[in-house]
Amino acid sequence: MSRAVLLVIVALLLSILPNVSHATAAGVVGTAGNLIREVEPRADGINHMDTPAMITALKALNVNTYVYPMAGGYDHWEDLRSEFLSAAADAGINVWVLVYAPSQSALSRPHGHDYVKWSSELATLSKSHPNLIGWTVDDYGFDLKTFTPAYVKQMRDAAKAINPSFKFIPTVYYSQYTAAFIAEQAPLLDGVIFPFRDEPVRNTAWTWSLSYQVKDLAKRLPDTDIYLMPYAHPLSRTALKPTVAYVETITKKALEHVRAGELAGVLQYKLPYMSRDPGWTRPTTDNLARTGKGRLSFVVEANTATKAGMSCSATRKVQLTPGAARRTVSFWHRANRGTGSPAGYHMKQLLLNGKVVWERDVAADPYTWQQATIDLTAKLAGATSATLQWRLYERKGVGNYSVDVRVDDIVTTGLQMSDPGVENAVTWTSGLARQGGPVHCSAQVYHQDYGADLGARIAKMYAAG
């Protein structure tokens, strides 16, 4: 019987019992990484983990699980054993340990790349600290030459011989769930962490592919617990950092899938949950709006192939002001290219009711904000409403020609549209549409107090389950 079916049956049974809440359990809710050290060194000269401060902040986030990374010195291991696990248990927080894979630059101490040793030592530690639930290997799917089925069986056997309930839940990206992986690896695992990054496009801006990928994995891994990992931390080699609205949307959708039995939980990737975290605030240089804090963004990532006709668009319905003599729309646009870039590939466009009424090559203007004004009076004669659509369109396909097109400060005459300054991402998100894949678009709203603003929203969702 699959986990999803079992959860549905349990929920149905609970629903008919008297005096029992009908809400489905939230499962695992937590965050991973971002260890915070003490401000001053101790007598041994080391700035140890600031366990009291971390636990206080994690409790405020309403997590029930924290993924503790083994990166850096031997003190990570000692602080985990001597301080953190007990404090987390007192706070009702379960702990998973993250160990780095052989291909990663970081080395986990004290056992390095001896993963059988890690498995047995962590399982032993879990016997004296029952809130140590399991462990994960980061970027596991990139190192399957090391993690052969035979070797993983050794790891599993070493742990289960000590603590049969101790779990191994490696981190595996969407494209790595091949038929061979599912057949050979999945039966040896107690679950998987699935970091969502909109593969194969790879970004932290587009949210619409999440549900498809979750449902696909739930169908292909019916007996495996899947834990979604949203990126609350910048993803390397991408054009845009995750915004508050992006992480909030991914988390909200993920929790819906938890309630549906398609996920076992949600674990944020490096959410900055304390003011001493470097990611707690965002520099003002991250605000790429012309004015205010928000803008539309249309992106083709580096090293990304596109085909002619691909696009991404932001569509809004507008109402016509009765009796207006003129109907116009103006807006400011900018691309991170310039007149020295190749022309004829990426096109900025405005469409009225599905037809192009304005177009500009990303290479036609210098790297500064430009204003466009389009008179729509004749085209809207006799109409009472219309749709405006800003779009990045691929005139010709590219192999590696990245671009970030920005639109801001929309002004209309004789037309009525809410949030023309793009200050509320929710207003725009439902009108986003991607055709063909690699071109993505979003409403990017800057939050200087990123950690505090995002943490408050995540804490509320985690509390609600």
Image (cartoon, rainbow, N blue to C red):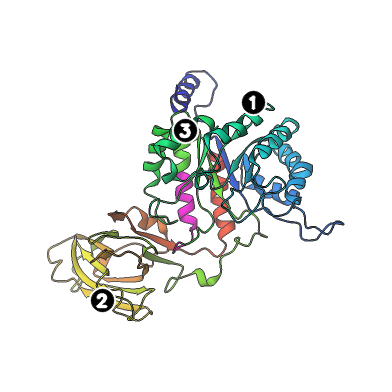
Q: Quadrant of residue 118?
A: top right
Relative horizontal placement of residue 93, taking residue 319 as reference (left or right): right
Relative horizontal placement of residue 273, taking residue 344 as reference (left or right): right
Residue 83 percent across, percent down from the top left = 78, 44
- Tell whether position 215 is magenta: no
> Tag count in the figure?
3
The disc label shown at residue 10, or none:
none
Q: Quadrant of residue 276?
A: bottom right
Tag 2's secondary structure?
strand
For image coordinates 58% across by 43% down, the residue present is 137
Query: Of marks 2 and 3, which one's residue comes earlier in the chain?
Result: 3
Label 1 or label 2, whichever lies nearer to me, is 1
Residue 427 percent across, percent down from the top left = 37, 57
Gap between marks 1 and 3, in whole Å? 21 Å
Count residues near mark 3 (Cα–Cα under 10 Å), then give few for <14, some for 14-19, many for 20+.
few
Count residues near mark 2 (Cα–Cα under 10 Å), then give few for <14, some for 14-19, many for 20+.
some
For image coordinates 30% across by 65% down, the residue present is 398
Observer able to see residue 93 = no
Query: Of marks 1 and 2, which one's residue comes earlier in the chain?
Result: 1
Residue linked to disc 3:
184
Q: Quadrant of residue 178?
A: top left
Residue linked to disc 2:
373
Query: Of marks 1 and 3, which one's residue comes earlier in the chain?
Result: 1
Gap between marks 1 and 2, in whole Å? 68 Å
The amino acid type, in three-letter code, at marker 1 is Pro
Observer able to see residue 32 = yes
381 vs 360, nearest the viewer: 360
Identify whether 67 is placed above or below 277: above
Q: Which residues are magenta?
A: 238-253
